[in-house]
Amino acid sequence: MDQQNDRETEVEQPDWLKNYTPAPGPLRGNPNWHKGMRSPNPSGKPADFGVARTKITKLLLENAGGILERQIEKALEGDSAAAQLILSRVIAPLKSDSGRVKFDFDASLPISAQVEKVLEAVATGKVSPEVAQQIVSAIGTLSSVRATEELEQRIVQLEAKAVN
């Protein structure tokens, strides 16, 4: 039963790794260190190790209210850096929104005609150049998907002819 469990948990290695043995080389740590050697730090880690960070964190937490009040006072006095800091913590940054656009578009048209429709929408002011760039990029993606589908259909037809 134990052998079966060992086989179930054993990691199967790929063929190219089965005969691999790592080259001997330096191991991690001090090469002069050996088991049973006297410790270079017999007293161990100091008792106050990491205490400074803990003290600072505790001090900041105890005074967080006062710090916040002072920053708000400075912001109200006109300190733009303080105002920016406070507002960035309270209000999420605005994301650009191009809004919805409507114009005549036919996805069944050839790709060049679709791009012409987008350029026409830009020329008439229905679509901003930035939005038009995004639409043309989407049309390019549609074009590559169509090309892949057409190639797939051609391959299927060629394979069907080869079988017959």
Image (spheres, rainbow, N blue to C red):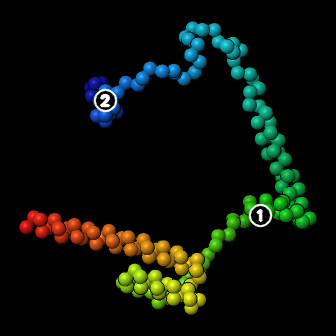
Q: Is residue 63 above or below residue 80?
A: above
Task: Tell me whether the residue at label 2 lies in contact with that at label 1, contact meaning CB atoms closer than 8 angstroms.
Answer: no
Looking at the rendered structure, the kind of residue marked 1 is Leu
Q: Nearer the viewer, residue 114 or 67?
A: 114
- Whether residue 89 sits left or right of residue 155 in the image: it is right
Residue 119 seen: yes
- Numbered tag placed on residue 18 in the rendering: 2
Q: Position of residue 113 (x, y in %)?
A: 41, 85
In this image, 59 relative to 17: left or right? Answer: right
Picture coordinates of residue 66, whole percent (x, y)? 87, 52
How many angstroms separate mark 2 from mark 1 (CA)? 59 Å
In the picture of the structure, the residue carrying the numbered disc 1 is 87
Which percent across, then down, holds residue 105? 44, 86
Q: Residue placed farthest to the left in the image?
A: 164
Q: Which mark is nearer the camera, 2 or 1?
A: 2
Q: Quadrant of residue 44?
A: top right
On the picture, is 56 further left or further right than 153? Answer: right
**In the rendered image of this protein, does residue 95 appear above or below residue 124?**
above
Q: Position of residue 128 (x, y in %)?
A: 59, 82
Type of the residue with mark 2: Lys
Labels 2 and 1: the sequence-earlier one: 2
Residue at horizontal 67 percent and vertical 13 percent from the top: 40
Q: Is residue 6 at all visible to an observer of this figure?
A: no
Q: Is disc 2 placed on a helix, strand or loop?
A: helix
**Which residue is at 48% across, 77% downward?**
136
